[in-house]
Image (cartoon, rainbow, N blue to C red):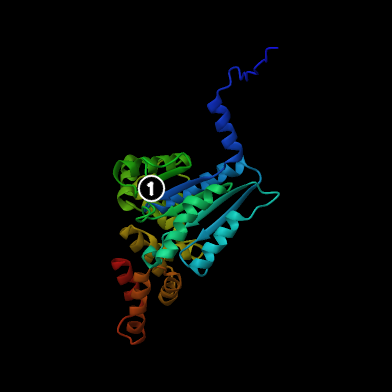
Amino acid sequence: MTKTRRVWNFGNWNLKFIWNLVLEIWCFYMIIYLYGLDSYRRQKKIKELVDDYSKKYSALNLGYFDFSGQNGDKQEEFDRLREFTTTQSLFVSKKLVILENAFFKISAYSIGQRKELKEFLKVQLPLHNLVLIISEDNKPPVGFDFLINKETAASELKFQEFNKLEGERLRHFIKKEVNKREINLTSTAINFLAESFSGDSWGLVNEIEKLSLVKENIIDINKIEEISDYIMTPNVKQNAYYLIMDLISSQSFSQKIRNLEILFSNQEEPAKIFNILASQAQSVRLVQKIADYDPLVKSGRLDYEEVLLDLVINH
């Protein structure tokens, strides 16, 4: 009796398609490395990714981790991250992890800590059902360049760079943002904003948000200055914190000087401004600079107004 051999017939089904479908269902693992000094667009990209994955997977568990030390000891934060990624749940099938400052002060890491982090990213994470978004100012350090290597990057590794916007790219960004808010700017007004906020997307978007609050058919350079004063002065108490933080975060010198003038003209106490900056300082350089000012103010050699002006000019 002749045996009949069974033949699997998938018809028009493509085996590669079937395999990709299986991977989509069972293998959720991916690392997305976002880097560059334009933190505004980086944060915007993270929000887009979170929104997309939240819509796609209803049972998505979102975790946020920061290795800068702000949330406690770095090793404790790493242990918390590892626990989050490895813990299984009956109700949560997918996890989305956002990790910031993964390589903060990487030079201070021991050889063992570097090896542990590298093993975690390359070996341990692929075993779990998750997407990891890493957000950094710079490219990954030596030993972690696999995160942005085009030649060796697998399909589960993606990366995108966000350089500071300048020139034509910045003008295109301005047009996109003002069109989104239905604001009509003259070409000279767009150029003015591009020059004033070159490399400072946060300050630029804040300024565009202010412009969107005033109903004008067409806004030119003169109107921008007019509108800025109109919006900022009545609400300066409400916006004071953001104006103060811009003194150290904005890359636009003209914006920082303008913010300082607004704060002074609205009788914001210089000592209060200085103390807020001191409490929010994060970089070692800024912390040291503020510490150097303190005895000069207390001895009467400088007043707070002079200190703030010097800080804006030199930071």
List x then y, in percent, for residue 296.
Answer: 32, 83
> Looking at numbered disc 1 in the image, what kind of residue is underneath it?
Phe
From the viewer's perspective, is residue 120 above or below residue 77? above
Q: Quadrant of residue 174?
A: top left
In depth, the one of 217 and 184 nearer the eye is 184
List x then y, in percent, for residue 201.
Answer: 39, 51
Answer few, some or many: residues within 10 Å of disc 1's Cα (few below 14, many 20 plus, some between 14 and 19).
Answer: some
List x then y, in percent, for residue 247.
Answer: 38, 64
Residue 83 visible in this rendered orientation of the protein: yes
From the viewer's perspective, is residue 45 above or below residue 103? above
Measuring 58% from the left and 54% from the top, which residue is drawn there?
Answer: 85
143 vs 131, left or right, is: left
In depth, the one of 101 and 45 nearer the eye is 101
55 vs 254, left or right, is: right
Tell me the element at label 1: loop
In depth, the one of 20 and 211 nearer the eye is 20
Measuring 44% from the left and 40% from the top, which residue is drawn there?
Answer: 154
Residue 217 visible in this rendered orientation of the protein: no
Measuring 29% from the left and 67% from the top, which residue is drawn there?
Answer: 313
The residue under label 1 is 162
108 vs 25, left or right, is: left
Instruction: Say which quadrant the N terminus sits in.
Output: top right
Residue sticking out furthest to the top? 1
Instruction: Say which quadrant the C terminus sits in.
Output: bottom left
In depth, the one of 98 and 262 nearer the eye is 98
Residue sticking out furthest to the front? 1
219 vs 85, left or right, is: left
